[in-house]
Amino acid sequence: MNRGSRAAALPLSMGNAAGPWRGSDHYTCWVLRERQMKRAGLASVVATAVLLITAAWSSAGPRRGPEVDVFIGVGPVYRYPPPPYYVYPPVVYPAPVLVPAPIYVTPTPVYAPPPPPSAPAYWYYCQSFRGYYPTVPSCPEAWIAVPGR
């Protein structure tokens, strides 16, 4: 075999002389995917440019009617001040009622004079019955007063 006949001796699955995979399904699939990726990249670049241009035109001045803002990025971006947040009203407590401490007025003690000294207690003795009153209810003679113990 000569050198020129070697290319002809290769099986068809190896491809032609321009490349080993040109005629295979893998090559065709790869080419199609590459074209799809290029088209998707171009479409995203065009869409981004259109959105940026329309966003620049939309903020040119005051408008009447509904607004549509397009945001591409992370986090909220406001063209106007953010909406107000609800703030709870301050808690108002009623003023404390100050009750003064009770004032106790104690009356000045009135000292009563001591009672007069009582008369000494006496027992009455009857000599004739040899007994004391009230054991002896009556005595024929005068009662004798005996100081109590």
Image: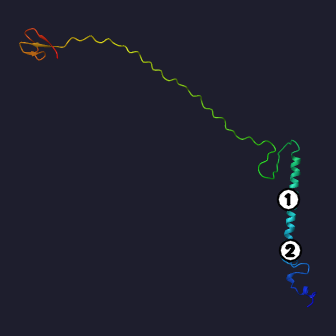
Badge 2 element? helix
* Residue 65: x %, y % from top left: 84, 44
Residue situated furthest bottom in the rendering: 1
Q: Earlier in the sequence, mark 1 or mark 2?
A: 2
Instruction: Tell me the residue at 87%/67% (across/down).
Output: 35
Q: Residues within 10 Å of mark 2 (few under 14, many from 20)?
A: few
x, y percent for residue 112? 33, 12
Give amino acid for label 1.
Ser
Q: Which residue is at a point 86% across and 55% down the rendered structure image?
A: 48
Q: Which residue is mark 2?
A: 28
- Quick one: label 1, few (<14), some, or many (20+) residues within 10 Å? few
- State left or right for residue 75 relative to residue 10: left
The kind of residue tagged 2 is Thr
**Residue 44 marker:** 1
On the rendered image, what quadrant is the C terminus found in? top left
Apparent side of residue 46 relative to residue 134 in the rendered image (left or right): right
